[in-house]
Image (cartoon, helix red, strand yellow):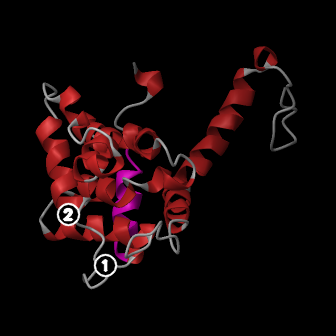
Amino acid sequence: MSDGKTDSTTFTRMQDATKADYELIGQRSAHFFLGLPHRVLAHLRLLAGDTGGYAVDRLTHSLQSATRALRDGRDEEYVVCALLHDIGDTLASTNHSELAATVLEPFVSEKNHWIVKHHGVFQGYYFFHHLGLDRNMRDRYRDHPHWRDCAEFCALYDQNCFDPAYDTMPVEEFEPMVTRVFSQIRKSIYMA
């Protein structure tokens, strides 16, 4: 329990906490939450330097995706999803789409969340056949209302974003957008 003199709680089991403890935790959590856009951008920057064999590094790919979406007049939330669609590459190389979608889910529409979550299998349309896999694996989602949206995202803002000569915008140009998108919770597991 909080003794009122410290800036942290002292309980060791949640069942022993008090309302005052959770008020303090709530204050700290709110402050920590404000730093989320900066932590997301710092994690995005971890994609710099590693090309994975492509003509550009993973950060440039992500920036190019967001740049193309912005220049095509997509809304800010969509642009941020384009920017962060591969942010999971550093920690979840085999299921990066799901990790990126989880990070974005509370802050974006159901449609944008679905696009990010499934873009990995949809992107496979462009290369799975070279690996002995079914390039049409995305068709298992053919009846989903966002199938076309995800296919369009991959066609316009993913499969074509490996161009070292493209006039790609720097990450700093997207920072205000990331801050705005991550400042409004649209959905929470606690709001169900």
- On the image, the x and y values in percent for residue 15 come to 77, 14
Which residue type does callout 1 highlight? Met
Residue at the (16%, 71%) spot, across then down: 71
> Which amino acid type corresponds to the residue marked 2 in the rendered image?
Ala
Q: Nearer the viewer, residue 66 or 26?
A: 66
Q: Is residue 108 visible?
A: no
Reply yes or no: does residue 175 show up in magenta: yes
For mark 1, what is the residue? Answer: 169
Q: Is residue 24 magenta?
A: no
Instruction: Pinpoint residue 169: horizontal percent, then vertical percent.
Output: 31, 78
Q: Secondary structure at mark 1?
A: loop
Q: Dot 2, crowdedness within 10 Å: few (<14), some or many (≥20)?
A: many
Residue tagged 2: 69
Q: Is residue 75 among the parts visible in the rendering?
A: yes
Q: Earlier in the sequence, mark 2 or mark 1?
A: 2
Viewer-side residue, 137 vs 40: 137
Q: Quadrant of the N terminus?
A: top right
Identified at 34% across, 37% down, the residue is: 186
Identify the disc placed on residue 130. none
* Along the line of sight, the residue nearer the viewer: 164 or 2: 164
Range shown magenta: 173-184
Label the magenta part by its dominant secondary structure. helix
Residue 40: image location, x then y, percent: 50, 57
Cα distance, mark 2 to mark 1?
A: 11 Å
- What residue do we see at 23% from left, 42% from top? 135
Is 143 positioned to the left or the right of 170 in the image? left
Image-based side of 52 in relation to 68, left or right:
right
SS at circle 2: helix
Q: Quadrant of residue 173?
A: bottom left
